[in-house]
Image: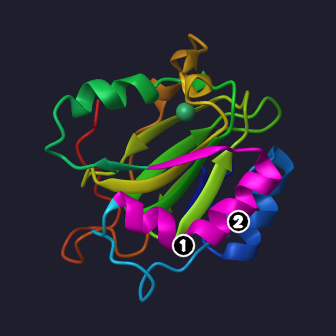
Amino acid sequence: MATVRIPEQNRTLTEKAEIRAFLAPFGIEYDRWAVAGRIDRDATSEEILRAYDPEIQELNRRGGYITADVIDVTPDVPGLQAMLDRFNKEHTHAEDEVRFIVKGRGLFFIHPDTHPVFSVEVEEGDLMNVPAGTKHWFDLCRDRTIRAIRLFREKAGWSPVYTGDPIAAGHEPLCFGPGYFNPNQPRLAPGPALV
Ligand SMILES: [Fe+2]
Protein backbone atom coordinates (compact mmCIF):
# COMPACT_ATOMS: atom_id res chain seq x y z
CA MET A 1 0.00 0.00 0.00
CA ALA A 2 1.17 3.49 -0.71
CA THR A 3 2.02 5.96 2.03
CA VAL A 4 1.00 9.59 1.56
CA ARG A 5 2.68 12.21 3.71
CA ILE A 6 1.80 15.88 3.97
CA PRO A 7 4.73 17.24 6.01
CA GLU A 8 3.31 20.74 6.47
CA GLN A 9 0.19 19.28 8.06
CA ASN A 10 2.01 16.49 9.87
CA ARG A 11 -0.39 14.00 8.27
CA THR A 12 0.28 10.47 7.03
CA LEU A 13 -2.26 8.40 5.10
CA THR A 14 -1.90 4.63 4.74
CA GLU A 15 -5.42 3.37 3.98
CA LYS A 16 -6.49 2.86 0.39
CA ALA A 17 -9.82 4.66 0.70
CA GLU A 18 -8.34 7.73 2.39
CA ILE A 19 -5.44 7.82 -0.07
CA ARG A 20 -7.82 7.69 -3.03
CA ALA A 21 -10.04 10.38 -1.53
CA PHE A 22 -7.07 12.63 -0.79
CA LEU A 23 -5.51 12.27 -4.25
CA ALA A 24 -8.68 12.53 -6.33
CA PRO A 25 -9.05 16.36 -6.16
CA PHE A 26 -5.59 16.62 -7.73
CA GLY A 27 -6.63 14.39 -10.62
CA ILE A 28 -4.42 11.59 -9.30
CA GLU A 29 -5.89 8.13 -9.55
CA TYR A 30 -4.64 5.50 -7.15
CA ASP A 31 -5.42 1.82 -7.26
CA ARG A 32 -4.03 -1.57 -6.26
CA TRP A 33 -3.47 -4.53 -8.57
CA ALA A 34 -2.41 -7.90 -7.21
CA VAL A 35 1.19 -8.97 -7.76
CA ALA A 36 1.85 -11.89 -5.39
CA GLY A 37 0.34 -15.07 -6.79
CA ARG A 38 -0.24 -13.47 -10.15
CA ILE A 39 3.15 -12.74 -11.62
CA ASP A 40 6.78 -13.46 -10.87
CA ARG A 41 8.30 -10.06 -10.06
CA ASP A 42 11.34 -11.12 -12.08
CA ALA A 43 9.39 -12.35 -15.11
CA THR A 44 10.30 -10.89 -18.48
CA SER A 45 8.85 -7.54 -19.46
CA GLU A 46 6.72 -9.26 -22.09
CA GLU A 47 5.28 -11.66 -19.53
CA ILE A 48 4.44 -8.80 -17.18
CA LEU A 49 2.74 -6.76 -19.89
CA ARG A 50 0.79 -9.85 -20.96
CA ALA A 51 -0.27 -10.63 -17.39
CA TYR A 52 -1.71 -7.16 -16.86
CA ASP A 53 -3.07 -6.71 -20.36
CA PRO A 54 -6.74 -6.48 -19.26
CA GLU A 55 -5.96 -3.66 -16.81
CA ILE A 56 -3.67 -1.92 -19.29
CA GLN A 57 -6.34 -2.06 -21.98
CA GLU A 58 -8.83 -0.51 -19.59
CA LEU A 59 -6.45 2.31 -18.70
CA ASN A 60 -5.69 2.85 -22.38
CA ARG A 61 -9.40 3.11 -23.09
CA ARG A 62 -9.94 5.66 -20.34
CA GLY A 63 -6.68 7.60 -20.62
CA GLY A 64 -5.85 7.43 -24.30
CA TYR A 65 -2.53 5.71 -23.74
CA ILE A 66 -1.22 3.74 -26.67
CA THR A 67 2.04 2.15 -25.57
CA ALA A 68 3.30 0.40 -22.46
CA ASP A 69 6.70 -0.78 -21.36
CA VAL A 70 8.43 -2.05 -18.23
CA ILE A 71 11.26 -0.10 -16.66
CA ASP A 72 13.79 -1.87 -14.48
CA VAL A 73 16.00 0.10 -12.12
CA THR A 74 18.54 -1.48 -9.81
CA PRO A 75 21.53 0.02 -8.00
CA ASP A 76 23.89 -1.38 -10.61
CA VAL A 77 22.19 0.23 -13.62
CA PRO A 78 24.89 2.22 -15.43
CA GLY A 79 24.30 5.94 -15.12
CA LEU A 80 21.66 5.51 -12.42
CA GLN A 81 22.47 8.77 -10.64
CA ALA A 82 22.38 10.72 -13.89
CA MET A 83 18.98 9.17 -14.60
CA LEU A 84 17.68 10.03 -11.12
CA ASP A 85 19.00 13.56 -11.47
CA ARG A 86 16.72 14.07 -14.48
CA PHE A 87 13.64 13.47 -12.36
CA ASN A 88 14.51 14.59 -8.84
CA LYS A 89 14.06 18.29 -9.67
CA GLU A 90 10.62 19.84 -9.92
CA HIS A 91 9.18 19.33 -13.38
CA THR A 92 6.03 18.74 -15.37
CA HIS A 93 5.23 16.59 -18.38
CA ALA A 94 3.05 17.18 -21.40
CA GLU A 95 1.34 13.89 -20.69
CA ASP A 96 0.36 11.79 -17.70
CA GLU A 97 3.02 9.86 -15.81
CA VAL A 98 1.38 6.48 -15.20
CA ARG A 99 3.12 3.84 -13.16
CA PHE A 100 2.24 0.41 -11.85
CA ILE A 101 4.87 -0.87 -9.45
CA VAL A 102 5.76 -4.54 -9.88
CA LYS A 103 8.75 -4.52 -7.54
CA GLY A 104 10.63 -2.10 -5.33
CA ARG A 105 9.61 1.37 -4.22
CA GLY A 106 9.63 4.97 -5.33
CA LEU A 107 8.78 8.38 -3.97
CA PHE A 108 6.72 10.96 -5.82
CA PHE A 109 6.55 14.49 -4.47
CA ILE A 110 3.55 16.46 -5.73
CA HIS A 111 3.42 20.25 -5.63
CA PRO A 112 -0.14 21.42 -6.31
CA ASP A 113 -0.84 25.12 -6.86
CA THR A 114 -3.36 25.21 -4.03
CA HIS A 115 -2.06 22.72 -1.49
CA PRO A 116 1.18 22.10 0.41
CA VAL A 117 3.66 19.64 -1.07
CA PHE A 118 2.90 16.01 -0.33
CA SER A 119 4.70 12.76 -1.10
CA VAL A 120 3.35 9.44 -2.30
CA GLU A 121 5.60 6.50 -1.55
CA VAL A 122 4.60 3.72 -3.91
CA GLU A 123 5.44 0.05 -3.62
CA GLU A 124 4.62 -3.28 -5.21
CA GLY A 125 1.00 -3.42 -6.36
CA ASP A 126 0.44 0.35 -6.48
CA LEU A 127 -0.92 2.10 -9.55
CA MET A 128 -0.91 5.87 -9.78
CA ASN A 129 -0.81 8.61 -12.35
CA VAL A 130 0.61 12.10 -12.19
CA PRO A 131 -1.60 14.18 -14.50
CA ALA A 132 -0.03 16.17 -17.32
CA GLY A 133 1.08 19.60 -16.15
CA THR A 134 1.30 18.66 -12.45
CA LYS A 135 4.45 19.94 -10.76
CA HIS A 136 6.28 17.01 -9.20
CA TRP A 137 9.56 15.21 -8.76
CA PHE A 138 10.56 11.62 -8.16
CA ASP A 139 13.24 9.75 -6.30
CA LEU A 140 14.03 6.20 -5.31
CA CYS A 141 14.22 4.82 -1.80
CA ARG A 142 17.48 3.68 -0.32
CA ASP A 143 17.40 0.30 -2.02
CA ARG A 144 17.33 2.10 -5.36
CA THR A 145 15.19 -0.59 -6.87
CA ILE A 146 12.00 -0.23 -8.84
CA ARG A 147 10.31 -2.17 -11.58
CA ALA A 148 7.25 -0.58 -13.09
CA ILE A 149 4.87 -0.68 -16.02
CA ARG A 150 4.70 2.70 -17.74
CA LEU A 151 1.92 3.85 -20.04
CA PHE A 152 2.33 6.53 -22.66
CA ARG A 153 0.37 8.43 -25.23
CA GLU A 154 3.60 9.44 -26.87
CA LYS A 155 6.98 8.81 -25.28
CA ALA A 156 8.30 12.19 -26.41
CA GLY A 157 5.64 13.84 -24.25
CA TRP A 158 7.17 12.34 -21.18
CA SER A 159 10.36 14.42 -21.26
CA PRO A 160 10.63 16.55 -18.11
CA VAL A 161 9.94 20.27 -18.39
CA TYR A 162 11.78 21.83 -15.45
CA THR A 163 10.10 24.58 -13.47
CA GLY A 164 13.42 25.95 -12.15
CA ASP A 165 11.99 25.96 -8.62
CA PRO A 166 14.62 24.52 -6.20
CA ILE A 167 11.87 23.27 -3.89
CA ALA A 168 12.92 19.62 -4.21
CA ALA A 169 16.18 20.34 -2.41
CA GLY A 170 14.17 21.10 0.73
CA HIS A 171 12.56 17.66 0.88
CA GLU A 172 14.65 14.68 1.91
CA PRO A 173 13.90 11.63 -0.25
CA LEU A 174 13.15 9.39 2.70
CA CYS A 175 10.91 6.35 2.52
CA PHE A 176 9.03 5.01 5.52
CA GLY A 177 6.58 2.52 4.09
CA PRO A 178 5.66 -0.61 6.06
CA GLY A 179 8.38 -3.20 5.95
CA TYR A 180 10.83 -0.90 4.28
CA PHE A 181 13.12 -0.34 7.21
CA ASN A 182 15.22 -3.00 8.85
CA PRO A 183 13.41 -3.73 12.16
CA ASN A 184 16.69 -3.25 13.99
CA GLN A 185 16.90 0.26 12.66
CA PRO A 186 15.11 3.17 14.35
CA ARG A 187 12.11 3.99 12.20
CA LEU A 188 12.94 7.65 11.87
CA ALA A 189 16.65 7.24 11.28
CA PRO A 190 17.34 9.13 8.06
CA GLY A 191 19.09 7.29 5.30
CA PRO A 192 21.75 8.85 3.11
CA ALA A 193 20.35 11.39 0.72
CA LEU A 194 20.21 10.16 -2.85
CA VAL A 195 21.49 13.40 -4.29
FE1 LIG B 1 8.00 13.09 -13.87
Q: Which residue is mark 1?
A: 1
With 149 as the anchor, is 20 left or right in this view?
Answer: right
Disc number placed over residue 104 in the picture, else none: none
Q: Is residue 66 magenta?
A: yes
Quarter in which the N terminus is drawn: bottom right
Residue at (67, 36) in percent of width and height: 153
Residue 62 placement: quadrant = bottom right
With 24 as the anchor, is 5 left or right in this view?
Answer: left
Q: Which residue is mark 2?
A: 19
Residue at (66, 49) in percent of width and height: 129
- Please report contact status of discs 2 and 1: CB closer than 8 Å, yes or no: yes
Percent x, y of residue 31 = 67, 68
Q: Is the residue marked by circle 1 packed among few (<14), some (14-19), or many (20+) residues within 10 Å?
A: some
Percent x, y of residue 12 = 61, 63
With 96 as the anchor, is 88 left or right in this view?
Answer: left
Q: Secondary structure at mark 1?
A: loop
Q: Is residue 130 above or below residue 106?
A: above
- Quadrant for ligand 1 reads top right
Percent x, y of residue 108 = 53, 45
With 28 as the anchor, is 14 left or right in this view?
Answer: left
Colour mapping used in the image: rainbow
Q: Which amino acid, mark 2?
A: Ile
Residue at (48, 62) in percent of width and height: 49
Q: Magenta span covers which residues? A: 45-69
Disc 1 C-beta below 8 A from ligand 1: no
Q: Which amino acid, mark 1?
A: Met
